[in-house]
């Protein structure tokens, strides 16, 4: 499932470990770095208007989401947010845009007690008459107890595969806004819009999963693609029962093929996907109650077959089905 973006990272930006700090290196949602008696989880994500946001996105939502996507990576590691750095490139110093952006950003930062400790601000220019878009890069740092932290490696054969919340709602909204899909705009649509525009990072869930999950990732680029990273880094495969996938309610209102595409490979869910031993089922169900968040078992970890395939997708009757959806890939 590795597309152009991940082949590019592998080829140019993945090196054998060096330097004095101990970490697992490139390839997880966060690098886990042991310094002194502390383990830090560090992640960075960049977003541009036009690529990650619609050109008319509300600046308050842009501020929220730019930080939320980074906090979602901290959640995938089970880390507690502590601090972040903000780099921003702007075509102009628009006071209204900036005050709204910073309100959205700082509301979320305060809610998670995650302090802004630095950054960089630059002005973008026109090149050959074309204005570069607003671009925001955030580096977030979280804290973990020494020796703890979730990674994408660690899934074992026979582990269950779980996912939080529901999938596919935000993608249905994107397709509707582009005018590609016809999606009725009822209550479920409004909820999906909120999930797309102001996603809530699953920080509390990630912290609870520290005790039970064997591997974890957040779903930013599509369920199959992000689970695929767990499978690749763990050297295993997944058997997924498609009728168990927690489909967003808005998907009931579109064709089943579109619904499946949105849930399996639409991006922007910002839910967590993880593996855990069968013995953890009751604990995970109790977490779901405590957090008031659906947590759904969608399949299990199996050995890779001779063709080295990552996925076996099963229909209601347990028969294998083929899908040709892939997740989001910036260079795909
Ligand atoms: P995420 O969506 O959780 O931010 P991805 O799955 O997109 O992460 O990225 C895969 C891995 O590649 C991550 O560990 C990320 O930190 C790393 N990565 C992406 N781009 C670069 C880069 N330019 N240099 C070094 N590492 C990178
Ligand atoms: Mg991630």
Image (cartoon, rainbow, N blue to C red):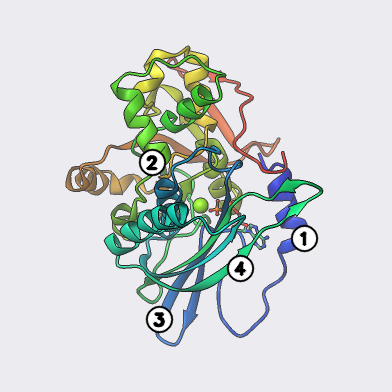
Which residue matches tag 2?
A: 162
Q: Is residue 323 left or right of residue 292?
A: right
Residue 178: x and y in percent read 56, 25
Question: Do tag 1 and tag 3 residues touch (Cβ < 8 Å)?
Answer: no
Give the Cα distance between marks 4 and 1. 14 Å
Q: Nearer the viewer, mark 2 or mark 3?
A: 3
In depth, the one of 103 and 190 nearer the eye is 103
Question: 241 or 116, which lies in front?
Answer: 116
Q: According to the image, label 4 marks what residue?
A: 25
Cα–Cα gap, marks 2 and 3:
29 Å
Q: Which residue is mark 1?
A: 12
2 or 4: mark nearer the eye? 4
Among the two numbered marks 4 and 3 on one chain, the one whose residue lies closer to the N terminus: 4
Q: Which residue is mark 3?
A: 38
**Rendering coords of residue 130 (x, y %):** 74, 46
Q: Residue at x 65, y 82 (%)?
A: 19
Q: Residues within 10 Å of mark 1 (few under 14, many from 20)?
A: few
Residue 199 located left or right of residue 226: left
Q: Residue at x 25, y 41 (%)?
A: 293
Task: Assign a secondary structure to mark 4.
Answer: loop
Give coordinates of residue 244: x percent, y percent.
Answer: 38, 26
Q: Earlier in the sequence, mark 1 or mark 3?
A: 1
Q: Which mark is residue 104?
A: none
């Amino acid at each position: 499932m590795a597309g152009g973006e991940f082949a590019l990272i592998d080829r140019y930006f993945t090196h054998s470990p060096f330097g004095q700090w101990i970490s697992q290196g490139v390839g997880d949602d966060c690098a886990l770095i042991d310094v002194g008696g502390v383990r830090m989880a560090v992640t960075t994500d960049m977003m541009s208007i036009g690529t990650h946001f619609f050109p008319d996105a509300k600046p308050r939502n842009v501020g929220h989401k730019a930080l939320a996507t980074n906090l979602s990576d901290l959640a995938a590691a089970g880390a507690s947010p502590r601090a972040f750095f903000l780099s921003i490139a702007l075509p102009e110093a628009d006071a209204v845009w900036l005050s709204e952006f910073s309100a959205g950003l700082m509301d979320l930062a305060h809610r998670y007690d995650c302090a802004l400790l630095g950054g960089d601000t630059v002005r973008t220019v026109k090149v050959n008459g074309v204005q570069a878009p607003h671009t925001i890069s955030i580096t977030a740092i979280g804290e973990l107890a020494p020796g703890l932290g979730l990674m994408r490696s660690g899934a074992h054969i026979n582990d269950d595969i779980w996912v939080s919340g529901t999938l596919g709602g935000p993608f249905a909204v994107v397709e509707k806004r582009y005018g590609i899909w016809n999606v009725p705009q009822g209550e479920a649509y409004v909820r999906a819009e909120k999930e797309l525009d102001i996603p809530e990072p699953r920080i509390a869930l990630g912290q609870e999963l520290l005790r039970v999950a064997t591997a974890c990732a957040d779903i930013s680029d599509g369920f199959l693609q992000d689970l695929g990273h767990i499978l690749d880094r763990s050297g295993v495969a997944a058997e997924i029962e498609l009728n168990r996938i927690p489909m967003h309610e808005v998907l009931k209102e579109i064709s089943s093929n579109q619904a499946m595409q949105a849930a399996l490979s639409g991006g922007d869910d910002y839910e967590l996907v993880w593996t855990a031993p069968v013995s953890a089922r009751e604990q995970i169900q109790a977490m779901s109650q405590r957090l008031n968040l659906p947590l759904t078992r969608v399949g299990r970890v199996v050995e890779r077959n001779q063709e080295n395939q990552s996925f076996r997708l099963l229909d209601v009757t347990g028969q294998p089905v083929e899908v040709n959806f892939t997740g989001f890939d910036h260079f795909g």
